[in-house]
Amino acid sequence: MYESIIEILPHFYSTTLIFDHFYGMLLFMERQIEKKLDIWKHKKRRKPLLLRGARQVGKTYIVRQFGRKFQRYTEINFELTKDAEHIFEADLKPDRIIRDLALLTKNKIVPGETLLFLDEIQEAPEAIKALRYFHENMPELHVIAAGSLLEFQIEQIGMPVGRVSAMYLYPLSFREFLVAGQNDEYLNAINNVFKEDSVNQAIHNRLMMLMGEYIAVGGMPEAVDCWIDTKDFQECSEIHKVLIETFRQDFYKYSKNYQIKYIDRLFNEIPHLLGRKFKFSAISGESRKRELNPALELLQKAGIVHKIFHTSGQGLPLGAGINFNRFKMIFLDIALSQTILNMDATSWILNPMEQLINKGSVAESFVGQELIARSEIDIKSQSFYWHREARSSNAEVDYLIVRNDRIIPVEVKSGKEGTLKSIHYFLKDHPQSPYGIRFYAGMPNISGKIRSYPLYCAAGI
C-alpha cells in the first residue's frame, strides 16, 4: 500500500517517534505472530486485542508494521502523551473517546479503516476498561493495546472476560532469526530433516554455526537487528547490558521497596540454576521461601523468567498432572542470561561445537526458548518436564510436548553422545507415547523409538 517509509509517516501519530524507530531498526523482522494478526484483522466477530509479553520483545514494532495494512493508523502512547489518559476518565463511551482522540492527534479515526494502537496502556487503567465497550458498541474499529508491564495492571483492575482477545509475544525464535538474517532457505533444510531423517554435512555445519550466532546474540529484536546490520558482537553485548539494566530499573515499578533485594538476587542467580530443579535454598543469603517466592512470582509476571513445571505425563492435558511445587526455570532470553553470568559469548560464534561440550544448561535453555516461542500465541505458554525420583532409577526428561494428541518426551544433550536412560524409562512407563526425541549436536538418526535430531531442529518441532 505504501511505497516507502516517508509515505507512511503522515499516517502515524508521532513523526519523530516513527523516524527514531524505523531508522533504529532498518531491517524488517518477520514474526510468527503476523499471520495471527492478519486473521484477527479479517475476523467478523473480532474483539479488541491485548498484545502481551515482556519489555523490549518487539510489541510496538510489530503493531506499527501491521498498521501499514490499514488505510489509517493512530497511535497513542500513554507514557509520552499524558493528556490522552484524561480522555478515558470522563466516561467510557467509544463515540466520544475516538472523537477526542482524533482532536488530540489531528488524525481522523474511521471504524473499518483505522487501526487504533493504545501503547503503554498500563499507564491508563480506564483505557483498559474501555476495551470492553469498544467491543460492545464499536466492534468495527480495529483496536490493539500493549504495554511493558501490562500484567500488573490487569491484576489490579481485571480483564474484561469474553470482551478482549490476547496474543503473546516472545523474543525472536531461531526460525525468526534465520528469516531476519535472510537465511530463510535453511528453514526448508530443517523441515527436510524431519521428512528424510538426514541432512547434508555442509548444511549441518552451517546451521550449527547459525545456531551458535543465535545463542550468542539471542532473540531480543534490538540485538538481532544490530548483529544483522553490523556483525559487531561487542555492540550487541552493549545492547544486552542496557536491556538488563532496563529490566532492573523496572523492579521499582512493580514491587515494594522491601522486595527489591529479593528480586535482584533471583534475577542474578536464576541464570546459574538453569536446567536444574529449582530450590529456594540454592539462592545465596539467608532469605527463605516466604520472601523469595513472591519475588519470583513478580519476575514471572514481568515475563523475565518462565517456570517449567513437573507433570506426571500420564494424560492430556499435560497440566492435569502438574506439581506446582516442582519446577525448573528458563530465562527470557538465552543471550541475556549469559550476559548476567558474565560469560564470553563470542566463542559461540567462532566454534559452537566446542562450546556445546559441557554446556548442557545452555543447550536445554535454547530448546526451551524455542518451544515457548513456537507455542500457541493466543494463550500464555506453559512448559513441562518429567522427573522420577527413586533410589534405583532416578530419571528426568527435559521437556514434554504434545504432537497429534500424543505426549512426546524430549531430551536435550549438548554433545554428540550421552545416555538416554531417562527417556527410555519414560517410554516404558508411558506406553501411550509412541516415541521420544533427542536433540543433540550430532546428525539425524532413528533408532527404535528414539528419534535423534540436531539441536537446531528444535526450530521445526
Image (spheres, rainbow, N blue to C red):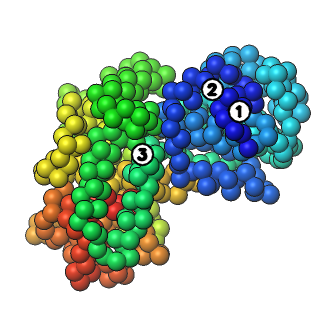
Callout 1 amino acid:
Ile
Q: Residue at x 42, y 45 (%)?
A: 181
Camera-nearest residue between 93 and 147 = 147
Residue at the spot of label 2: 18
Whether residue 329 is visible, yes or no, is no
Instruction: Name the element at disc 1.
Output: helix
Return the x and y of residue 242 as percentages of the image width and height.
37, 23
Q: Determine crowd level at label 3: few under 14, some 14-19, many 20+ residues with C-alpha closer than 10 A.
A: some
Q: Which of marks 2 and 1 precedes in the sequence?
A: 1
Return the x and y of residue 68 as percentages of the image width and height.
69, 40
Camera-nearest residue between 239 and 294 = 239
Callout 3 amino acid:
Gly
Q: Is residue 315 above or below residue 59?
A: below
Label 1 – label 2 distance at C-alpha: 10 Å
Q: Determine crowd level at label 1: few under 14, some 14-19, many 20+ residues with C-alpha closer than 10 A.
A: some
Q: Which of marks 1 and 3 precedes in the sequence?
A: 1
Q: Residue at x 68, y 22 (%)?
A: 15
Return the x and y of residue 354 as percentages of the image width and height.
13, 50
Whether residue 286 is visible, yes or no, is yes
Residue at the spot of label 1: 8
Return the x and y of residue 333 as percentages of the image width and height.
36, 41
Q: Nearer the viewer, mark 3 or mark 2?
A: 3
Q: Residue furthest front?
A: 3
Number of numbered discs overlaid on the protein picture: 3
Q: Is residue 416 above or below residue 430?
A: above
Q: Residue furthest left?
A: 392
Callout 2 amino acid:
Ile
Residue at the spot of label 3: 181
Q: Nearer the viewer, mark 1 or mark 2?
A: 1
